[in-house]
Amino acid sequence: MKFILTLIITCSSVLIFGQSREFEVNYRYGISTNNLTVLQPNTLTRADFKEIQSVWDQGIEFYLRREVFKKIHFSVCSGFNLSRTKHFQRIVEGDGRYHLDNILINSNRIEFEYGFNQDLRFKSGLTFYAGWSLVYRRYFKDSKQYFSDFKSNNEDWIEYSYDLKTYYNDYYESELNHSGQFGNHFRLGLKYPINDQFKLNVGLSLTTHNNFFYDFEYWINYYVGGSEDPTSTYHFGGIMGTFPDTKFGIRDDNLFFKVGLTYLLNQNN
């Protein structure tokens, strides 16, 4: 914590009182690195497809940068972003033969960043940059619940209901060892000058430990031979009520493409 406070105070003071500052705005769109691999079924992972899966993560970034070592074009930066994430949870029939539905999970958060950038500038005006930031995340809601009474989807011989609750901004006992409130942001990109004041930005970035926790419970009723009453039932109990401090956990390391503009606030020559 002392390191974090020192980094925040140092970056903030340099940005406020320094010259050669840039203000940057980017739109970013990303996917979880979990989506870049094909699940290979074995005794440990063949049920992973039933877990929550990431769809996308997108948002708007705002940065203020200031050059602190002009000869090598090294700068410190501070900023924040507003992001929205979409995941889904499959509802799969007990024997795994039918994919009945998806529960769509949306979450909104704000992230604060403090870090540095290293630029490599060419005579043409083109700039290549690499950087790192420490990220602090805060979701707008500590928890969110998704619930449905019994319903059918295409088949009249089977119906299901579910209760799913997501948890943010705290740590729960799970297979994860990280709350997700802090993470890293690694970035690479190019800046191309449009005029004396503006540059066009394109880049790639990776953020780590975008974690959250959840509990999930669902029920399935089967109606065989046109029966009006359930002939059999299936229940997946999750962890709800059994171990209140234990949850399922999801970790996303997100790979982003970003595009935006940089505005030169002042230039110290």
Image: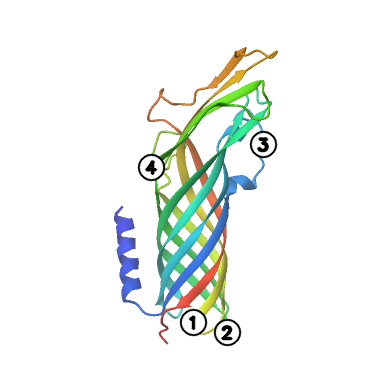
Q: Are marks 1 and 2 in contact (CB under 8 Å)?
A: no
Q: Report, in whole angstroms, how far the alpha carbon at label 3 lies from the one at label 4.
A: 33 Å
Q: Is 184 situated above or below 142?
A: below
Real-space CA distance between mark 1 and mark 3, rounded to the nearest whole angstrom: 50 Å
Which residue is tagged 4? 142
| Residue linked to disc 3 | 40
Distance between the alpha carbons at the discs numbered 2 and 4? 49 Å
Q: Are marks 3 and 4 in contact (CB under 8 Å)?
A: no
| Residue 92 against residue 257 in the figure, above or below | above
Mark yes or no: residue 94 visible.
Answer: no
Q: Which residue: 56% across, 35% down? A: 51
Q: Residue at x 48, y 70 (%)?
A: 118
Q: Name which residue type carries label 3.
A: Gln
**3 or 4: tag closer to the N-terminus:** 3
Q: CA distance from mark 1 to mark 2?
A: 17 Å
- Residue marked by disc 1: 197
Q: Position of residue 190 (x, y in %)?
A: 57, 71
State which tag comes first along the sequence, 1 or 2: 2
Closer to the chain start, of discs 1 and 4, is 4
Q: Which sits in the foreground, 22 or 55?
A: 55
Please tell me whether residue 25 is drawn above or below residue 152 in the rendered image.
Answer: below
Q: Are marks 3 and 2 in contact (CB under 8 Å)?
A: no
In the rendered image, residue 217, in percent from the top left (x then y), is placed at: 50, 27
Question: Hey, what amino acid is under mark 4?
Answer: Asp
Q: Residues within 10 Å of mark 2 (few under 14, many from 20)?
A: few
Q: Secondary structure at mark 2?
A: loop
Q: Which residue is mark 2?
A: 123
